[in-house]
Amino acid sequence: MKFKNELPQYIAEFIGTFFLVFFGCGAIILAELGNSHLNAFIPIIFGGTVTVMIYTVGHISGAHFNPAVTLAFLGAGRFPAYKVPGYIFAQVLGAMIASLAHSFIWGSQHSFGVTTLHISLGAGFFVETLLSFALMFVIISVATDSRAVGELAGVAIGLIVTLCAFVGGPLTSASINPARTLGPAFISQNFSSLWLYILAPLIGAYSGAKVYEWIQCNKIPHDDQASGCC
């Protein structure tokens, strides 16, 4: 009975992650196949998709669409452990099905949007960790603190995804999401630096959540806005 009640949340995570990879990596594929003018819009497409999906299914599942985000919420004590396997399974499956759809539409004469390093391994690990930190720092602020931007949370999260993609895209492909990497990797069978794209976002997202919570719990009280901390 519990699984039946949670099933809509898992489906929402599947759908959100599916469209994140379908539209985002689809834009990368189209740019590879000759529509090079799309390169400049790829970060906006990723960020825009996240924003749209947050407003579409965020009220159902919380709109994680990212195993690193789910595990960071768990580590911060803001998400129940028993839902984690279902969320991560739904996210990774959504990404894989999106890449399968790319294969059905365009065949295999492209990279499927696989995440690739264009800098050294150490620098790439640092970039992915830093970008994931920024992503989670924004998410946990606007999505869990009623004193933050509230109904504009989807816009703020979409914008940080866009910024991460603009800066990190030319360096590491700006994954910041193990599911976004795993989907194209499994379908293309290209597992280059896969461990980095799993581990770095997990470390970065967890650190971002914990640092935000530390700041919130140790700030100097201002008027009555310090109530409800932690």
Image (cartoon, rainbow, N blue to C red):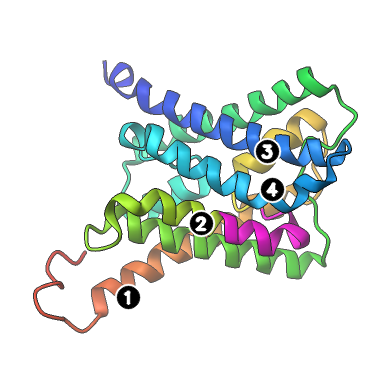
Per the image, the residue denoted by label 4 is 42
Q: Toward the viewer: 30 or 135?
A: 30
Q: Indicate left or right for 121 with 199 as reference.
A: right
**Disc 3 or 1, which lies upstream in sequence?**
3
Kindly report the distance in space between the C-alpha atoms of the residues bearing marks 2 and 1: 22 Å
Residue 191 pos. (x, y %): 79, 42
**Disc 2 or 3, which lies upstream in sequence?**
2
* Furthest residue in direction left, as rendered: 224
Crowding at label 3, few (<14), some or many (≥20) Cα neighbours within 10 Å? many
Per the image, the residue denoted by label 3 is 182
Mark 1 falls on what kind of element? helix
Q: Toward the viewer: 51 or 127?
A: 51
Q: Indicate left or right for 216 with 129 as reference.
A: left
Residue 175 pos. (x, y %): 66, 51
Q: Name the quadrant containing residue 178.
A: top right
- Whether tag 2 and tag 1 are in contact, CB under 8 A, the answer is no
Per the image, the residue denoted by label 2 is 159
Query: Quick check: 104 above or below 227?
Result: above
User: Image point 87% across, 26% down: which residue?
Assistant: 108
Please tell me whether the stretch drawn in magenta is mainly helix, strand or loop. helix
Give the foreground label among 3 and 4: 4
Q: Indicate left or right for 33 with 139 as reference.
A: right
Amino acid at pointer 4: Ile
